[in-house]
Amino acid sequence: MKLVSIGIFRGAFERKFGHRPKFSEVKLMVASAGPRAVESRTEQTLIRDYSAAWKSLADASETSSPTLLNAYFTGGAKTILSRELADQQKTGTHVRYLNQTHNLKAVFYSPEGDVMPVTGFRGVSNANRGVTKK
């Protein structure tokens, strides 16, 4: 019932304010990255793509469609997530990711600008991962 209530809330929010609430919030700390300073455009692109990857995961989980993972996931991560989606189809369940907060920190940014490892976590207190029967 909780997930239904959230769905109703999202619809009411959209009717009242004319847009859907943000899928997730991503915060990226770049102050300690170096030796090169992170450009604003690079920071915004990383946030945009990171958010889009989580959105594609949420959409794939909700619809059990592994092809929705293709744009942002490769290798072992894609294999594991695809297996989870297949298990969802077998058991008749699906996972919903809602109201996520991600706190990321760039730990290094190469002088050439081609490498930026990022650490982080999903704010557990702000995340809602519900499993429901279809």
Image (cartoon, rainbow, N blue to C red):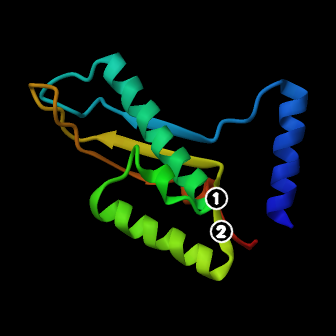
Residue displayed at 12% across by 31% down? 110
Tell me the tag on residue 125: none
CA gap, disc 1 and disc 2: 7 Å
Determine the image quadrant of residue 109: top left
Q: Residue furthest left?
A: 111
Amino acid type at circle 1 is Thr
Horizontal arrangement in the rendering, residue 97 relative to residue 48 (left or right)? right
Whether 24 is drawn above or below 79: the answer is above
Horizontal arrangement in the rendering, residue 44 relative to residue 95 (left or right)? left
Residue at the spot of label 2: 94
Amino acid type at circle 2 is His
Horizontal arrangement in the rendering, residue 23 relative to residue 103 (left or right)? right
Whether 88 is drawn above or below 99: the answer is below
Out of 45 and 99, give the one closest to the viewer.
45
Where is residue 26? Give x, y as percent: 50, 38
For marks 1 and 2, the one nearer the N-term is 1
Determine the image quadrant of residue 88: bottom right
Of badges 1 and 2, nearer the viewer stands 1
Residue at the spot of label 1: 63
Mark 2: secondary structure: strand
Where is residue 61? Give x, y as percent: 58, 60
Residue displayed at 29% across by 29% down? 31
